[in-house]
Image: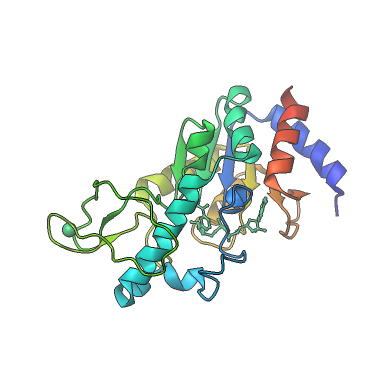
Amino acid sequence: MQSNEEAFSEAVSLLRSSRWTVVFTGAGVSAESGIPTFRDQLSSLWEQYDPEQLATPAAFRRDPNLVWGWYEWRRALAANARPNPAHLAIAALERYLPHLKLITQNVDDLHERAGSSHTIHLHGSLDAPRCFACARPFNQQRCVAGDTLHIPPPRCMHCNGRIRPGVVWFGEMLPRRELQSAFQAAKACDLLLSVGTSGLVYPAARIPEIARMNGAKIIHINPESAEVSGDCLLRGSAATWMPNLIAKAFL
Ligand code: NAD
Ligand code: ZN
């Protein structure tokens, strides 16, 4: 097993020599902005719920007020959060790696707010609600909710259907164009930096697999993940490693 020092110097030289780079992020990159991952302890309000049980079409049908309340709580968290040094470092990477593609599983907008110019969102966005019945986008102003478990979703002005969050729920298809662009980028890259993702949620988890199959090197930044043979693993937090990597590789 590589030590963190060995992994760090390997990662620095991989970054310096990369021409076609993909950064692939998951919930861990926003953890240090105060947005919990699905595996973190939640606030006392929500601790009795399993996020994976709330993030499904069946859960919305069963209890739309609870599911809408959950997403309104998450939307408020994201709205009040600020990009952390990992988001900022990823945005800064564009200056040094002109062919960089950023692919995220996150539904917050912290990459955009950090200055990343184009982000492929595989799992949608907290800020793009649409009708559960007719799928038309819902553009009306919503106020940011407080700490309430049950909030009735607004109604669609076209068909009176319930409005649902614009995220991809477990068991749903990913947006086709985004998934295609992500697979293409994974095929073409020579280096993929996987930051703060458990690699358990498919089909997004295929992205590093595709990159590896096509000969790319992979760097993981994660306090917990297990080592994959041949990959470079920096064990620890994204907000610590990302700025250090850029400083050493390019400044
Ligand atoms: P995940 O919850 O499955 O895994 C998060 C990973 O981040 C874990 O491997 C964990 O060890 C790692 N991690 C925790 N803190 C970290 C840190 N400070 N630095 C680096 N890594 C850290 O998240 P996932 O892989 O993105 O998949 C779950 C799904 O949940 C996603 O598809 C996403 O749509 C959704 N989600 C999104 C957000 C968000 O938008 N911020 C938050 C939670 C969940
Ligand atoms: Zn409708």
Residue at coordinates 75% horizontally, 57% vertically from top-left? Answer: 227
Residue at coordinates 73% horizontally, 55% vertically from top-left? Answer: 223
Residue in the foreground of this view, choosing between 72 and 201? 72
Quadrant for residue 187, please give it: top right
Which image quadrant shows ligand 2? bottom left
Judge whether 188 appears above or below 71 on screen.
above
Residue in the foreground of this view, choosing between 225 and 91? 91
Judge whether 112 appears above or below 41 on screen.
above
The answer, for residue 14, to whether it is visible in the render is: no
Residue 243 lies left or right of residue 25; in this view the side is right
Residue in the foreground of this view, choosing between 55 and 205? 55
Q: Position of residue 196 (x, y in %)?
A: 63, 51
Q: Position of residue 171 (x, y in %)?
A: 40, 68
Residue in the foreground of this view, choosing between 126 and 195? 126
Residue 224 lies left or right of residue 101; in this view the side is right
Residue at coordinates 23% horizontally, 64% vertically from top-left? Answer: 162
Judge whether 201 appears above or below 126 on screen.
below
Q: Quadrant of the N terminus?
A: bottom right
Residue at coordinates 71% horizontally, 34% vertically from top-left? Answer: 243
